[in-house]
Image (cartoon, grey):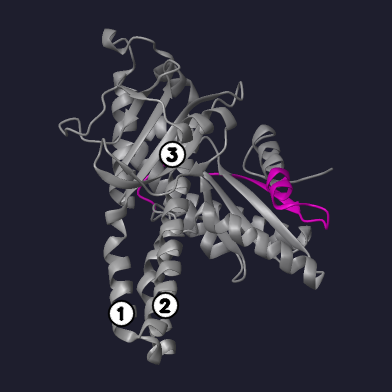
Amino acid sequence: MIILAIPSYLIYRGTKKLVLDNLGRSSMDIASTVSRFLENDIDRYRALNSIEDYSLENYDEEYYQEMTEVLQNIKSRTGALFIYTMKYGTTEDFIYVLDAEDPSSENYSPLGTTEPVWAELTTTFESGLESFTDFGYDPTWEADLVIGLSPIIDPDSGEVIGVVGVDYDYAYVQPLIDRIGTVILLGGLMFGLVLAIIIFHLFETRLEALETDYLTNLFSKRYFDRHLQISLTDARYRNQPLSMMMIDVDSFKAINDQYGHLAGDKILRETANILKSSIRRADICARYGGDEFSVILPDANSAQAKAVGERILENILHYQESPERTDSIPLTLSIGIAEWKAETTCEGLINQADTAMYSSKNTGKNKITFFEE
């Protein structure tokens, strides 16, 4: 029995680690999406963030309320325990800026609330890199938490002015892990194949949720980053072309300002639907963050990628002119395309497509631009 128990325990431990690691990466992806969203309206967030004495109540209360509601909506959709943003206070504390908790909750941290410094948050401020923590017990909240962290970077100065935190409680995945343990205990090694199938099925749904963007149902940034590396390796091995698109909704901040964030969410969902219907079966489309989308195009050179991009813009135009639309919100996209070269890394290809996309935005919008060396 001991001999049988050891492999079962190893299977259980490995599966548990996989589930927890995926939850940590998901928390980081959500934090990244929130930070990109805030950076789209950096002037108002910077103004809120830069106030030194919030007790004077000399801040944009309308913006604060709007952003609180946005974070509450994300928290509700994703099942996160806490979502918040913080800034540096002194060398000994951080200061809460936004908090997704209900103001009537005892867990709510009002604007200006301080918290003692902690290492992972300090590292994110200093490095400007996304990360997530290991699960650990937090005595303040009396819970085992994993925390995803993403910097809020001022596009004008490149300075990290804040950090988004997304916390998940171990209780979020505990039922799934307990069910896996029960199956392993009851199944034993005699039913190894059946056991593996059952285990896979138990957490497949959860992993699928972690790799799907909560708003658009496209792939998440986490899924995209992993599969870009896989796609580049495959293209190099087969000596086949590969291209990538970065796509941005034009004037999205103005859409949010004029029509509201619910209308902005609708535009993102409609854009996602159009992208899914426009790309090829083998292409991988993800919400990269905020109002930015990305597409991996395997076996596609620049000319073939251009054809996909033109189909996207054509379908966006049809959507604009559709008599079935119930709103008059303008929607156009700026697209950047980069074709992979053998010496180009994943990060390099992303930067190239991003550069081309910003060129489209800066030269008239609603167009396709190719990256040129």
Q: Is residue 81 magenta?
A: no
Circle number at residue 185: 1
Mark 3 residue element: helix
Mark 1 residue element: helix
Name the residue type under label 3. Val
Instruction: Tell me the CA gap for discs 3 and 2.
Output: 42 Å
Name the residue type under label 1. Leu
Question: Where does the image place residue 21, in percent across and percent down from the top left?
Answer: 46, 57
Name the residue type under label 2. Ile
User: Could you tell whether 72 is left or right of 214 in the image?
Assistant: left
Viewer-nearest of discs 2 and 1: 2
The magenta stretch is 325-352
Question: Where does the image place residue 248, in percent across and percent down from the top left?
Answer: 57, 43
Of residue 242 and residue 125, the one placed in the foreground of this image is 125
User: Could you tell whether 135 is left or right of 141 in the image?
Assistant: right
Mark 2 residue element: helix
Question: Where does the image place residue 243, in percent across and percent down from the top left?
Answer: 72, 58
**Where is mark 3, residue-wise?**
34
Residue at horizontal 38%, vertical 10%?
52
**Quarter of the view holding residue 49:** top left
Question: Where does the image place residue 337, in percent across and percent down from the top left?
Answer: 71, 50
Instruction: Quarter of the image for the N terminus: give it.
Output: bottom left
**Quarter of the view holding residue 202:** bottom left
Instruction: Tell me the CA gap for discs 3 and 1.
Output: 40 Å
Which of the two labelled residues, at mark 3 and mark 1, occupies the earlier sequence position? 3
Residue at horizontal 66%, vertical 64%?
230
Which of the two labelled residues, at mark 3 and mark 2, occupies the earlier sequence position? 2
**Where is mark 2, residue-wise?**
6
At label 3, counting other C-alpha atoms closer than 10 Å, the crowd grade (few under 14, some 14-19, many 20 or more) is many
Give the vertical position of 264 relative to 200 (above or below): above
User: Could you tell whether 306 is left or right of 254 in the image?
Assistant: right
